[in-house]
Image (cartoon, coloured by chain):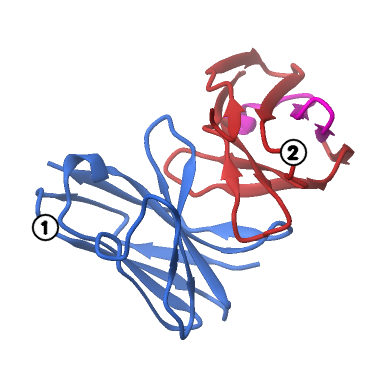
Chain colours: A red, B blue
Amino acid sequence: QKEVEQDPGPLSVPEGAIVSLNCTYSNSAFQYFMWYRQYSRKGPELLMYTYSSGNKEDGRFTAQVDKSSKYISLFIRDSQPSDSATYLCAMSANNFNKFYFGSGTKLNVKP
Amino acid sequence: SAVISQKPSRDICQRGTSLTIQCQVDSQVTMMFWYRQQPGQSLTLIATANQGSEATYESGFVIDKFPISRPNLTFSTLTVSNMSPEDSSIYLCSVGGVYEQYFGPGTRLTVT
């Protein structure tokens, strides 16, 4: 069983839609949860991070963590064509040096 | 923030040869990380490179296959040795931790 599971998509939505991206995990030791955005032929860039359970909002992006279900989500409101990218979740226990990544969900926002 | 550059950006190599990938950071950092990203797969940590000490390798990766150098606080190299087609992948270096992590643009390697 993989440490982190992520639906690879692709996910295609019209501009302005609300997008929901999700990951599940198996290791209850994970405390830090991150979302990255990766444009084609670029390295991942950190979008948001959360610690433990709860929600965190940053502009059009909301990260949600449900540790009881071992499930995390990233919501994108009012999606834009510029949001078209691959989104990766990542997790870490107390050891900041070891991140476990999902395989990424490819998102296409159509104008 | 940190700006990371990698060389080469891409290469096509023959099996049995070696390729050295360079990673340059615009600021001094203690730890640098090397990842592999295979098509449709998650990023997998190869090793952590601290300046002045031996790199720490993750399970499934060995120093003979992926030797790493870390001569100073802004630079590191990863060598992919005795390459096979299974080594075709994107190799990325990164710096930072949970709250602030930066990746290089990656080196796209194809082994024929």
Residue in the image at 31% along x and 65% along y: B63
B46 relative to B81 in the view: left or right: right
Q: Position of residue A4 (x, y in %)?
A: 60, 33
How many other residues sit within 10 Å of disc 1, few (<14), some (14-19) or many (≥20)? few
Say which amino acid is labelled 1.
Thr
- Mark toward the viewer: 2 or 1: 2
**Is B76 or B84 nearer to us in this picture?**
B84
Secondary structure type for disc 1: loop
**Disc 2 and disc 1: Cα gap in Å?**
42 Å
Q: Which mark is residue A28?
A: 2
Residue A62 colored in magenta in the image: yes
B67 relative to B81 in the view: left or right: right
Region in magenta: A61-84
Q: Position of residue B24 (x, y in %)?
A: 43, 72
Q: Circle 1 is placed at which residue position?
A: B17
Residue in the image at 17% along x and 51% along y: B83
